Image: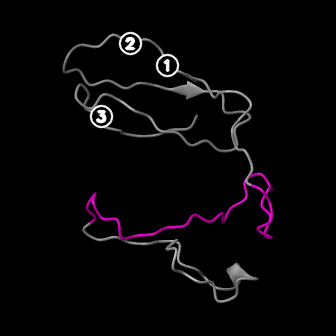
Amino acid sequence: MDKSYTFPNPANPFEEVFPEVYNINNFTGNNQTPNFVAIKIGDLNNTATGNLQAAADDRNAASELVFQTAEKSVKTGESFTIEITADLADIMAYQFTMGFDKENSNWKPSSLEWI
């Protein structure tokens, strides 16, 4: 949400439909004009409090989420799929970044399928 947005009734922010999308046309990497603020509009684990007095909660899991994949031999120029699995039984939400060597890879994400 744009930081300059003001709720008409701060005591009840859901009284109106507030803007959840901010379009930037002709975006360039050097565009530093937008100023965004994150707001929690969902509550996956019933920990939301609306009084703004609560301290920030630690969302780091007590253990690691381990991804598994099988070893695979490939030839130069060959297209292939890598299946990545994990035990998601106790996971409510997860956010991560996956990196790869851009100089030596040609990443073409095709699909994400939860099994």
- The answer to which image quadrant residue 35 occupies is bottom left
Q: Tell which of 110 and 55 is nearer to you.
A: 55
Mark nearest the camera among 3 and 2 is 3
Q: Main secondary structure of the magenta part?
A: loop
Residue 115, relative to residue 42: is it above or below? above
The quarter of the rendered structure image containing the C terminus is: top right
Instruction: Locate residue 59, reporting x and y percent.
Output: 70, 44
- Check disc 1 and report the residue beneath it: 69
- Check disc 2 and report the residue beneath it: 72
Amino acid type, mark 3: Trp
**What span is in magenta?**
27-55
* Tags 2 and 1 touching, CB below 8 Å: yes
Gap in Å between the C-alphas at discs 3 and 1? 17 Å
Tell me the SS state at disc 1: loop
- Check disc 3 and report the residue beneath it: 107
* Tags 3 and 2 touching, CB below 8 Å: no
* Tags 3 and 1 touching, CB below 8 Å: no
Residue visible at 26% across and 28% down in the picture: 105
Residue 60, relative to residue 14: is it above or below? above
- The answer to which image quadrant residue 102 occupies is top left
Reply yes or no: does residue 34 show up in magenta.
yes
Instruction: Locate residue 60, reporting x and y percent.
Output: 69, 38
